[in-house]
Amino acid sequence: MAVVVGLGLLLAACGPDGAVVDAPVTSTASPPTSQSPSPEPVPVAPTTSPFSGREGGVETPVMVVKLDNTPSAQPHRGLVKADIVYVEPVEWGLTRLAAVFSTDMPGTVGPVRSARVSDIELFAPLGDIAFVYSGAQRRLQPKLAAADWTQVSQDVNSPGFSRERGTGRYAPYNLMADPQEILATSGATAVSQDIGFVFDEQAPDGGKQATRVTARWPSMSVQFRWNAKKDLYDVWMNGQQARDTDKPGVQRASTVIVQYVKEVDSGYGDKFGGRTPLTILTGSGKGVLLRDGRSQRILWEKSSDAEPTAYTDLDGNPVVLDPGQVWILLKDRTSKVAIE
């Protein structure tokens, strides 16, 4: 009987031609479970301006306006809404302002004044901006027209300009610009983009007290006075507090960068014999960062006209700016600001 049973089992394990085949194996182990790959993290889209760290201003149109800052220009219109304000040296030891608007456009901005040759390199990194100014000396006009921006100037009959009447302002200090009309008609395509600024409300460690900082030119001064109650610097020009017709009415800065640059004769000048300085913005140099009532020594570097300026601390890390309006002073490296 055992032989018969064994023979039966052997025949059951053979194929039809007598070949031996493997018997099926029964397993009690659970089948392996397939694990889904971890999803890739989705980057969080920025919600703040790359120019000021303010809410909004993400890929919004960019307009730059040249402004007067002599006593006759006060109070400004709309300057409080600028993301960045540059202070540029011009003829006769004076300065002019160049304000970058993107996050919040004012209803009116002014007084609008003339362009300078340094503007071309200064704003090349921003792309096809609407560059708003009142005019320029004749020899400079072709160079401004050929720059990689959209020219918006009163002297070429661009729309969006008007003279303010009945307020006590007189020409040339009553020329105003309408940002909404300019952006609607200029055809400029630039939108706000990363220019290397890093923002954080938390102030960096270190630095020295800086409650009053004064920058002087032969015929002009700009001063920043720390306002601890507002956590901002009040802006003063030529010994008078800078004001604006828009709210909050007082000009204030959250961060100030003093950028020490080399100045040379640009080859241009006004009809009275004043020579226009050219600020050398490529290369590298030293500077000062002001925020939260303290100053910090910094460095700057710019590799080419089209690249933005990189501002770093002495260890090579990007400087951290306080969210809000940023002022950048282009100051001749032979004359330092006074810090108290």
Image (tube, rainbow, N blue to C red):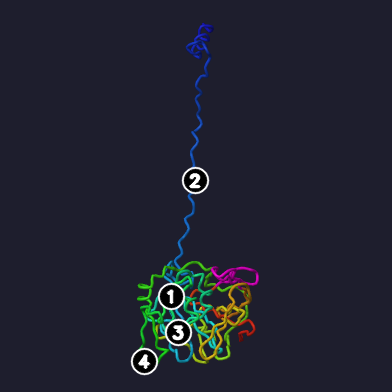
Going by the numbered disc 2, the residue's amino acid type is Pro
Q: How many discs mark residues in the rendered view?
A: 4
Tell me if residue 108 comes above or below residue 15 in the rendering. Answer: below
Q: Are marks 3 and 1 in contact (CB under 8 Å)?
A: no
Q: Give the range drawn in magenta.
A: 300-320
Residue positioned 34% across, 92% down in the render: 166
Residue positioned 55% across, 91% down in the render: 219
Is 237 or 37 nearer to us in this picture?
237
Going by the numbered disc 4, the residue's amino acid type is Thr
Q: Are marks 3 and 4 in contact (CB under 8 Å)?
A: no
Mark nearer the viewer, 2 or 3? 3
Going by the numbered disc 1, the residue's amino acid type is Gln
Mark nearer the viewer, 4 or 1? 1
Task: Indicate the secondary structure of the residue bearing disc 1.
Answer: strand
The residue singled out by tag 3 in the image is: 113
The residue singled out by tag 2 in the image is: 37
Q: Do the residues labelled 2 and 4 touch (CB within 8 Å)?
A: no
**Mark 2 or 4, nearer chain start:** 2
